[in-house]
């Protein structure tokens, strides 16, 4: 049985499908179960529920951005194996997207109204990173994942002690992001120059601040 050959048009349509599913539909997830499955929900005050809802909205928006980033990089990756790594990582991030959306709804709030902005902005950044070369593209993935881990650690510290459902999700996400960073570096990712890393931090803070509110 011969492997199917995908044309550039096939790849383009796949990327369009991913974008539509991410923003308006049901993304394709892996076989993994939601980490919060079977974990009892806790009593939260209105203020705690609102704050945790904002944190989970940030994390959902971050996963929307991750989809855009990985899809943009896959569009411009030069080596097929790098493209495959980007597409596999994007599928694993879909798990996070679904878990966060489910928790956001449980908390009685909404996902970010600015998700289209996060997606297409990240898609553009990812495509530019991929165009710069596979080693820089992979390095950008690794640095992004390291920054996400720091955000997750901050959110875990802010969660009410009794909110074990949100904690289970964020702990698993943190583990996955660390794995993605390791894979990106082992595949030949180059450490980004310090000025680029320093710019990424403030940009991320603007996004998280807006996502928390909107």
Image: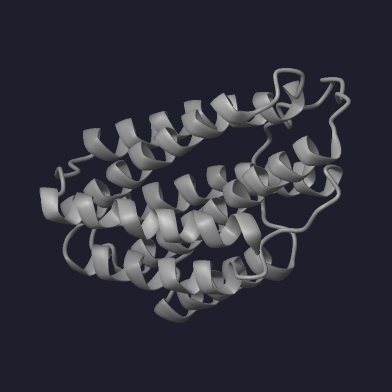
Q: Position of residue 189 (x, y in %)?
A: 19, 43
Count of number-bearing discs: 0
The x and y percentages for residue 49 are 79, 39
Camera-side residue of 119 and 87: 119
Q: Residue at x 43, y 41 (%)?
A: 148
Q: Is residue 94 visible?
A: no
Instruction: Provide residue 109's location: percent of width, then percent of height.
Output: 80, 53
Q: How is the image coloured?
A: one colour
The residue sitting at 82% across, 49% down in the picture is 105
Q: Is residue 76 above or below residue 28?
A: below
Q: Is residue 131 left or right of residue 212?
A: left
The image quarter containing residue 77 is: bottom left
Q: Is residue 106 above or below residue 122?
A: above
Residue 48 lies, in percent from the top left, at 76, 35
The quadrant in which the C terminus is found is bottom right
158 vs 19, nearest the viewer: 158
Instruction: In this rendered view, identify the residue nearer to me: 135 or 10.
Output: 135
Residue at x 70%, y 18% (from the top left corner): 161
Residue at 71% across / 58% down in the picture?
A: 111
Answer left or right for 9 relative to 187.
Answer: right
In the image, is residue 91 above or below residue 126? above
**Residue 154 shows in this picture:** yes
């Amino acid at each position: 049985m011969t492997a199917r050959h995908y044309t550039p048009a096939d790849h383009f349509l796949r990327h369009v499908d991913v974008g539509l599913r991410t923003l308006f539909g049901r993304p394709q997830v892996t076989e993994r179960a939601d980490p919060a499955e079977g974990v009892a929900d806790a009593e939260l005050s209105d203020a705690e529920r609102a704050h945790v809802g904002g944190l989970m909205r940030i994390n959902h928006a971050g996963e929307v951005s991750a989809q855009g980033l990985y899809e943009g990089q896959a569009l411009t990756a030069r080596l097929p194996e790098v493209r495959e790594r980007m597409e596999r990582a994007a599928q694993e991030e879909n798990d996070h997207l679904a878990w966060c959306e489910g928790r956001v709804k449980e908390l009685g709030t909404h996902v970010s109204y600015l998700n289209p902005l996060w997606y297409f902005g990240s898609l553009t950044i990812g495509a530019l990173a991929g165009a710069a070369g596979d080693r820089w593209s992979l390095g950008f993935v690794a640095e992004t994942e390291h920054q996400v881990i720091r955000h997750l650690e901050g959110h875990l510290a802010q969660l009410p002690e009794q909110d074990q459902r949100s904690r289970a999700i964020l702990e698993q996400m943190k583990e996955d992001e660390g794995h993605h960073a390791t894979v990106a570096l082992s595949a030949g990712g180059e450490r980004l120059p310090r000025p680029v890393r320093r710019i990424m931090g403030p940009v991320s803070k603007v996004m998280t601040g807006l996502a928390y509110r909107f």
